[in-house]
Every structure is written in structure tokens, then in C-alpha cells.
Image (cartoon, grey):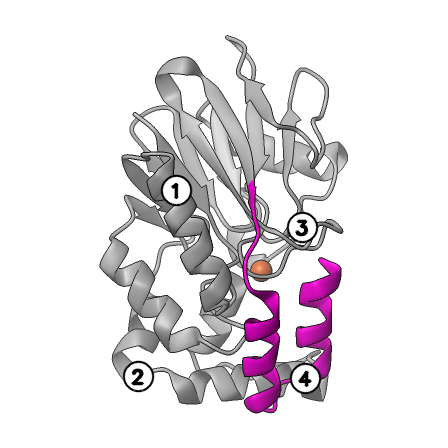
Amino acid sequence: MKYAIFGDIHANLEALTAVLSEAERLEVDKYICTGDIVGYNADPRECVKIIRDLQPEVIVRGNHDDYAGTDISLPGFNPQAANVVFWTRNQLSAEDRQWLRELPLNRTTGSSTTIVHATLDTPGRWGYVFDKFSATASFNYQFTPVCFFGHTHTPVVFDKFGSTKNGDFKEAIFEPGHKYMINAGSVGQPRDGDNRAAFVTYEPEKKKVSLHRVEYDIAIAQEKIRKSNLPERCAERLARGH
Ligand SMILES: [Fe+2]
């Protein structure tokens, strides 16, 4: 069994299609999505449709799915960020927005894998797991050997009982008795200085996770952002990968 695990797509259609065709080339059997399908970029409707049609085994709700799927006010948002949320809400059908807001915050598949967007200790508060220290609180609520998460847009493997593998890891083999939190990186807005789309494959029988980076047409994604009058910063950062 081979899973493709990916998230933080953020309405980047070019990155999403590049990742899915690479996953197909790698002959994955199933998909898992760690959330944040929308936000920042210009194709929320198309990305929601692709993910819904793909029918991943698990999809969890990200904070941007929450902002776009609900009518919650956005305290603490700067005006530009709030405008992206309002724009995204307007692009989506009522039915897509309902689907987004009803996604679960976390899920366990079988007995070995948990999926969450942000953290397991307080998943709806959208805290960040940036380092081993901040992973500790989440580990306390992880009852499976492996957890996949998103939100930081930075690939990493935290091992509760071992060393951390940062974003340049190619693959990690799980050791018996250890506990892992793995960030698959971001499909549509990488923030680790590498502007290629990121995702991981996971082969439970081999206890192996592999990181993949995929080039995509950044210029087209940027052009769509500019044509939609979304913030220039959203376009610029795609090229920087940060
Ligand atoms: Fe995100």
C-alpha cells in the first residue's frame, strides 16, 4: 500500500495538478489530505472540485477551510488577508462551503495513523508545531505511532524518542516503539525556501515515508493571482518559496 499525503494546497491549481500527476506516476493507491485546500491563491473552486472528486481516504479541515467555509468574523486579520478570505468565500458555492466547514479536525485511519492540520492537543486553535518543543504537547494526544500534519508549510519528521529530520530529508524509516509527527510540506505555498510543490508518500508495510518535490508553472499561478486582484505578496512568495 502506498499513500500520497499532501496539504496546504491553498487554491494553487497548477501546483495541485503537478503533484497529483507525480503521485500517479509513483503509482500511489490512496490519498490523504492534511487540509487548507483554499486561501491565498486564485483557484479555490477548481481545487475543491479536484479534491472532492479524488475522494481521499481522509481529509481534515485547515484554518483556511474554516475561514472560507464559515461566516466567522476575522479578528486580528490584516485587511489584505481578510480580503482574500472574503474573495474566496465569494468564489465558492454554498454547498462547497458547507463541505469545507464540515470536514473533521482530526482523524485516525486504521490503528497506526492520525491526521490533523495544526496540532493534536488543541486542533481548532490552529497553533503551530515548528520544533520538537512545540511537538511535545501534540505527542501527548497522539495515540498512534504516526501522525501527519500541515499548517507550517515546512516538511519535517519529528521523532518523540529520536532526532529530527528537517526539510531536506529524502526518506525516513520508522523504528519500532518510536512516535512520529510528519509534516508533508505544502503543495501550493511552500515556505521552506524551496519553491517546488511538496508532498510525501507513505508505505505502512515498509514503515517508510518519502518526501517529493515537484516543479510546476509558478508564472501561471502568479498571473492568475494578479488578474484576480489578490495581494501581490501572494504572487511574489510563490517564486521565493517562503
Ligand atoms: Fe496553510
Left or right of 242, for residue 32: left
The residue mark sitting in front, 3 or 4, is: 4
Q: The residue under label 1 is which amino acid type?
A: Ala
Question: Is 78 drawn above or below residue 4 in the view shown?
Answer: below
Mark 4 vs 1, N-terminal side: 1
Q: Main secondary structure of the magenta part?
A: helix
Q: What is the spatial separation of the Cα atoms under label 3 and label 2, in whole angstroms? A: 30 Å
Residue behind label 3 places its C-beta within 8 angstroms of ligand 1: no
Q: Do tag 1 and tag 2 residues touch (Cβ < 8 Å)?
A: no
Mark 2 or 4, nearer chain start: 2
> In the image, which residues are magenta?
213-242
The Cα atoms of the two marked residues, 3 and 4, are separated by 24 Å
Circle number at residue 93: 2
Q: Name which residue lies at 72% across and 19% down.
A: 163
Which x, y percent locates residue 16? Answer: 45, 59
Mark earlier in primary sequence (3, 1): 1
The circle on residue 23 is 1
What residue type is disc 2 on? Ser
In this figure, which residue is indicated by the disc labeled 4?
231
Residue 40 percent coordinates (x, y): 58, 73
C-alpha distance separating marks 3 and 1 = 27 Å
**The magenta stretch spans residue 137:** no
Q: Earlier in the sequence, mark 1 or mark 2?
A: 1
Circle 2 or circle 4, nearest the eye: 4
Is residue 190 depicted above or below 78 in this figure?
Answer: above
Q: Secondary structure at mark 3?
A: loop
Residue topped by disc 3 = 128
